[in-house]
Image: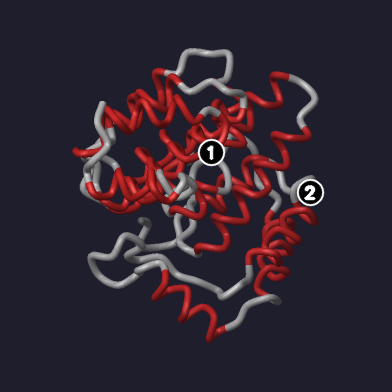
């Protein structure tokens, strides 16, 4: 987490006016009390997973509205600057804009530029809401028909946020009924110590089960006794109650 507002080097001159307009617009939605509540919720205290992050107190729907207002006006260099700031809403709104740019891109070159911006500034994609709002909408579709080694590098990196990006990115593959990478990454992260990974892996397994019950069930039968409890609970949330209890009590047999 950056301790101070920082700026990355960019190839082109960045129009300061656009950034100032964006920031002032976002700031107009700020709420001091909400900012304090968010700081506690996202564990910004020392040793918390969000340590050092700061909040304006802007609601997510308002951030999305600002993103729609500015995503055409701000270029990728400007968005990169926002991704390297310590204000949480700057980074979250930045990824909202990148998602919009990716979805509206008309060429592969335009999509590649968005992906490059995202990956080159990925140190700013460093909280679960920022990750969950973006990676499966940018990295997922980009990697759909490409080599996915990057996700395995992230999963094995030891970095909490890169690991969450790896597994959440597979939501796009799952939506297309391709489960192999999600299952392989779940196996890598099976014994991860952090509950933010437990929840993410369990969530992706549940997404698989929503489309292919047998695929999720087969994975769980093989691994559920070694899974953290939170991961298991997330994974079996929509199972019939008798099956859920079987997994929770350890009575399901391979």
Determine which quarter of the picture holds residue 11: top right
Residue 135, disc = 1
Q: Which of 180 and 78 is in front in this view?
A: 180
Say which residue appears at 58% left-offset and 23% top-offset. Answer: 177
Instruction: From the image, tell me which residue sits under label 2.
Output: 73
Which secondary structure, mark 2? loop
**Image mark count:** 2
Residue 249, disc = none
Circle 2 Cα neighbour tier, 10 Å, few/some/many (<14 / 14–19 / ≥20): few
Which secondary structure, mark 1? helix
Q: Which of 9 and 252 is in front in this view?
A: 252
Horizontal arrangement in the rendering, residue 178 relative to residue 41 (left or right): right
Say which residue appears at 50% left-offset and 71% top-offset. Answer: 55
Q: Height in image: 32 above or below 124?
A: below
Say which residue appears at 70% left-offset and 19% top-offset. Answer: 108
The residue sitting at the bottom extreme is 33
Horizontal arrangement in the rendering, residue 214 relative to residue 249 (left or right): right
Distance from Cα at disc 2 to Cα at disc 1: 22 Å
Colour setting: secondary structure
Q: Height in image: 144 above or below 189?
A: above
Rendering coords of residue 120 (x, y %): 48, 34
Q: In which quarter of the image is the C terminus?
A: top left
Determine which quarter of the picture holds residue 180: top left
Q: In which quarter of the image is the N terminus?
A: bottom left
């Amino acid at each position: 987490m950056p301790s101070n507002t920082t700026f990355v080097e960019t190839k082109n001159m960045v129009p300061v006016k656009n950034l100032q307009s964006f920031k002032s617009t976002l700031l107009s939605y700020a709420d001091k009390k909400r900012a304090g509540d968010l700081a506690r919720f996202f564990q910004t205290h020392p040793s918390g997973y969000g340590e050092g992050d700061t909040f304006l107190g802007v609601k997510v729907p308002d951030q999305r509205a600002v993103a729609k207002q500015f995503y055409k006006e701000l270029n990728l260099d400007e968005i990169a600057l926002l991704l390297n700031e310590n204000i949480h809403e700057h980074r979250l709104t930045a990824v909202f804009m990148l998602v919009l740019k990716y979805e509206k891109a008309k060429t592969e070159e335009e999509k590649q530029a968005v992906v490059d911006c995202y990956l080159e500034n990925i140190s700013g994609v460093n909280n679960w809401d920022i990750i969950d709002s973006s990676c499966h909408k940018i990295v997922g579709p980009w990697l759909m028909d490409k080599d996915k080694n990057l996700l395995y590098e992230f999963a094995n990196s030891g970095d909490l946020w890169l690991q969450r990006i790896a597994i959440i990115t597979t939501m796009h593959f799952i939506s297309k009924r391709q489960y192999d990478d999600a299952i392989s990454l779940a196996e890598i992260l099976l014994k991860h110590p952090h509950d933010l990974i437990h929840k993410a892996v369990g969530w992706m397994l549940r997404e698989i089960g929503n489309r292919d019950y047998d695929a999720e069930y087969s994975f769980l039968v093989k691994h559920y006794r070694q899974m953290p409890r939170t991961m298991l609970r997330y994974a079996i949330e929509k199972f019939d109650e008798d099956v859920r209890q079987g997994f929770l009590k350890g009575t399901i047999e391979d």
